[in-house]
Amino acid sequence: MTTVSIDADIKAKWPQGHSSYSPGSPEELAIIGIDLLVKELGTQAAQTFIAQIFEKYPLNYRGLTDSE
């Protein structure tokens, strides 16, 4: 499996506040993205949106390999 690292500074703002994030891995970026989706769309709509993304991949998809 391929190791992916991320170097990003994310600043998010909404009427009730703001946050800054510096994810270093896809897992950290996903947590941030899901948190922001829930803030924006609510729990049910965020789950529906994420389910649509998962539909693009087969259930047994194992991620990118070094040869890809």
Image: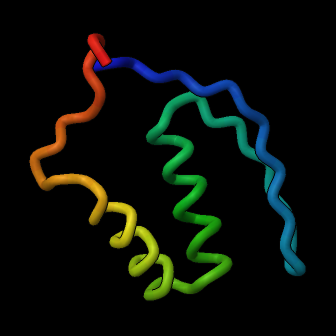
Is 27 displayed left or right of 33 in the figure?
left
| Residue at image coords 17%, 43% | 61
Is 10 displayed left or right of 53 in the figure?
right
Is 6 displayed left or right of 27 in the figure?
right
Most extreme residue toward the top, as rendered? Answer: 67
Depicted 39 relative to depicted 57: above or below? below
| Residue at image coords 39%, 18% | 3
| Residue at image coords 86%, 79% | 16
- The image shows residue 9 at horizontal and vertical percentages of 78, 36
Q: Nearer the viewer, residue 43 or 50?
A: 50
- The image shows residue 20 at horizontal and vertical percentages of 80, 48
Q: Nearer the viewer, residue 42 or 64?
A: 64
Q: Quadrant of residue 52?
A: bottom left
Give the quarter of the figure containing the N terminus. Answer: top left
Q: Nearer the viewer, residue 51 or 40?
A: 51
Coloration mode: rainbow
Depicted 3 relative to depicted 56: above or below? above
- The image shows residue 37 at horizontal and vertical percentages of 59, 71
Depicted 66 relative to depicted 33: above or below? above
Give the quarter of the figure containing the C terminus. Answer: top left
Is 4 displayed left or right of 24 in the figure?
left
Depicted 16 relative to depicted 17: above or below? below
The number of callouts visible is 0
- The image shows residue 64 at horizontal and vertical percentages of 29, 27
